[in-house]
């Protein structure tokens, strides 16, 4: 299992650890959430406050698991954009795309998207892939593309809990909490007003607003 997780996380360095083995990641995720992944991600959609007609961005979308749930909440008049550095994951997400979804290759810290263009920005389990020194840039980019009055929901391994001993990403999140601080601090430093933060199985999350 340890070797599997190391291989899974052994992607491109410098800008982040890209996950090309996204199907394996899906399996590991289902196991890690102990059968509760669907419930946890439905709660994430609800915390993100997606409304029918919203324009939503999912950063680090992998094969589009959360993006499809977001699209269901945004409805036929909404739109979901997914961004991930893995060409393989984006290819898979595109093959499973509904008409209201667009997927593009890219990284959180350099989003090739217009300013103030999304009502909601989500980012789940991807921040631990971004090198610690680039996480502030990733939040600044998410802020830039959020509309004034728009909402942010970021969730990742909870650094306050003992890290999953075999998971390199959970250990990275734990170490980085000491230097770059928790998700709330990163969101506030980017300019968001933090509305709430809390815990979900495995994860901590921050919910924030770009002030109108
Ligand atoms: C553990 S997966 C999480 C996928 C999905 N968001 C979820 O919650 O299931 C992490 C994803 O982050 C992506 N990633 C890696 N570096 C990134 C970066 N710099 N910016 C955005 N995403 C990144 C990986 O390619 C991978 O698809």
Image: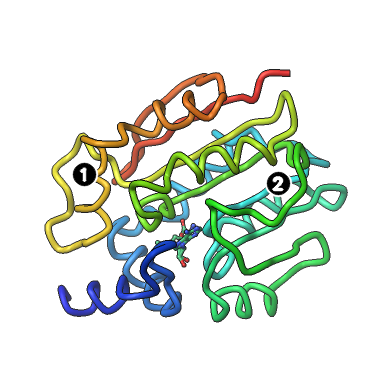
Quadrant placement of the C terminus: top right
Kindly state the secondary structure of the residue where label 1 is placed.
Answer: helix
Would you identify the image quadrant in which residue 158 lies?
Answer: top left
In the rendered image, the quadrant that contains the N terminus is bottom left
* Residue that badge 2 annotates: 56
Horizontal side, residue 79 vs residue 157: left or right: right
Callout 2: CB less than 8 Å from ligand 1 = no
Answer with mark 2 or mark 1, whichever residue precedes in sequence.
2
Residue displayed at 31% across by 36% down: 180
Residue most toward the right? 77
Task: Tell me how far mark 2 sits from mark 1, CA to CA.
Answer: 28 Å
Residue 49 in picture, x, y percent from top left: 64, 33
Give the SS element for disc 2.
strand
Report crowding for label 1: few under 14, some 14 to 19, many 20 or more residues within 10 A (C-alpha): many
Residue 189 or residue 38, whichever sits in front: 189
Could you tell me if the residues under marks 2 and 1 are in contact, i.e. CB atoms within 8 Å?
no
Q: Is the residue marked by circle 2 packed among few (<14), some (14-19), or many (20+) residues within 10 Å?
A: many
Q: Position of residue 57 (x, y in %)?
A: 66, 49
Residue 129 is marked as none
Residue 203 vs 1, above or below: the answer is: above
Left or right of 132 on screen, residue 41: right
Q: How many marks?
A: 2
User: Residue 53 location, x and y as percent?
Assistant: 83, 41
Pick whichever, 134 or 8, lies toward us. Answer: 134
Say which residue appears at 57% left-offset and 78% top-offset.
87
Q: Residue at x 69, y 41 (%)?
A: 145
Q: Position of residue 211 (x, y in %)?
A: 67, 19
Front disc: 2 or 1: 1
Q: Nearer the viewer, residue 93 or 41?
A: 93
- Tell me: 98 left or right of 178: right
**Which residue lies under the disc numbered 1?**
174
Residue at 17 percent across and 48 percent down: it is: 163
């Amino acid at each position: 299992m340890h070797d599997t997780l190391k291989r899974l996380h052994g992607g491109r360095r410098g800008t982040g650890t890209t996950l090309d083995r996204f199907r394996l990641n899906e399996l590991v995720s289902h196991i890690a959430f102990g059968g509760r992944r669907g419930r946890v991600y439905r709660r994430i959609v609800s915390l993100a406050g997606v409304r029918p007609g919203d324009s939503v961005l999912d950063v680090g979308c992998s094969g589009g698991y959360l993006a499809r749930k977001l699209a269901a909440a945004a409805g036929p008049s909404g739109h979901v954009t997914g961004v991930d550095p893995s060409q393989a994951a984006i290819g898979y997400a595109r093959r499973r795309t509904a008409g209201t979804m667009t997927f593009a290759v890219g990284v959180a810290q350099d989003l090739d998207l217009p300013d103030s263009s999304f009502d909601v920005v989500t980012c789940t389990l991807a921040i631990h892939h971004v090198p610690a020194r680039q996480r502030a840039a990733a939040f600044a980019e998410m802020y830039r593309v959020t509309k004034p009055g728009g909402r942010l929901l970021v969730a990742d391994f909870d650094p306050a809990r003992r890290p999953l001993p075999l998971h390199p990403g959970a250990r990275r999140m734990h170490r980085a909490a000491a230097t770059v601080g928790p998700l709330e601090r990163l969101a506030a430093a980017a300019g968001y007003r933090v509305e709430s933060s809390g815990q979900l199985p495995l994860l901590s999350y921050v919910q924030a607003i770009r002030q109108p």
